[in-house]
Amino acid sequence: MASDLKLTGLRETLKGLDATPKQILEKLRPVVRNHTAALEAAARSNAPVADGELVGSIKAEVAEGDDWIFGRVTAGAPHAIHLEYGTVNNPARPYLRPALQQQKGKFAADAKDAVKDL
């Protein structure tokens, strides 16, 4: 199970900058790395059980290329999706979506702050 974050309005913010895409990306790389790690930590903290298979399966991944960066947090335990969304017999006990909600505003603010001087 993965959760992706989509930012809106960033394209308009970046259009007003007097910088090359490479300069912008270099400013955003540490922001993506830091917030991906923070999202992983928050998801682990929110997990219904403090240890065990679910917490051990929550992983952060940052992939980078010359002109892109991508951060993802996944929970690979077989029951991860059942805890996040619930089942017919068990109510949802979300841990990843609340972590994403906690982080997305901070991420957007830090991303905007990182490129403001370009």
Image (cartoon, rainbow, N blue to C red):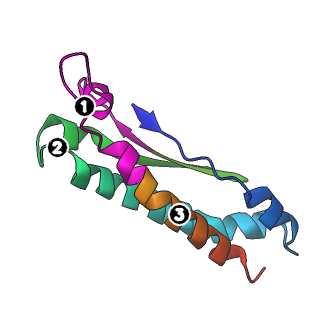
93 is within the stretch colored magenta: yes
Amino acid of disc 1: Leu
Indicate the quadrant containing the C terminus: top left, top right, bottom left or bottom right.
bottom right
- For the point 44% across and 53% down, which residue is it? 101
The residue sitting at the top extreme is 88
Can residue 112 be seen in the rendering of this structure?
Answer: yes
Q: Is residue 12 left or right of residue 109?
A: right
Q: Which residue is identified by label 3?
A: 105
Residue type marked 3: Gly
Q: Is residue 86 above or below residue 27?
A: above
In percent of width and height, residue 112 lies at 66, 71
Q: Secondary structure at mark 3?
A: helix
User: Distance of mark 3 from mark 1, alpha carbons?
Assistant: 24 Å
What percent of the width, then of the height, locates residue 7? 64, 52
User: With respect to residue 55, does 110 lie above or below?
Assistant: below
Left or right, residue 10 beside residue 99: right
Quarter of the image for the N terminus: give it: top left
The quadrant in which residue 102 appears is bottom left
* Kind of element beneath mark 2: loop
State which region is magenta.
73-100
Q: Residue at x 49, y 61 (%)?
A: 33
Mark 2 residue crowding within 10 angstroms, few (<14) / some (14–19) / many (20+): some
Mark 2 — residue?
48
> Of the residues under marks 1 and 2, which one precedes in the sequence?
2
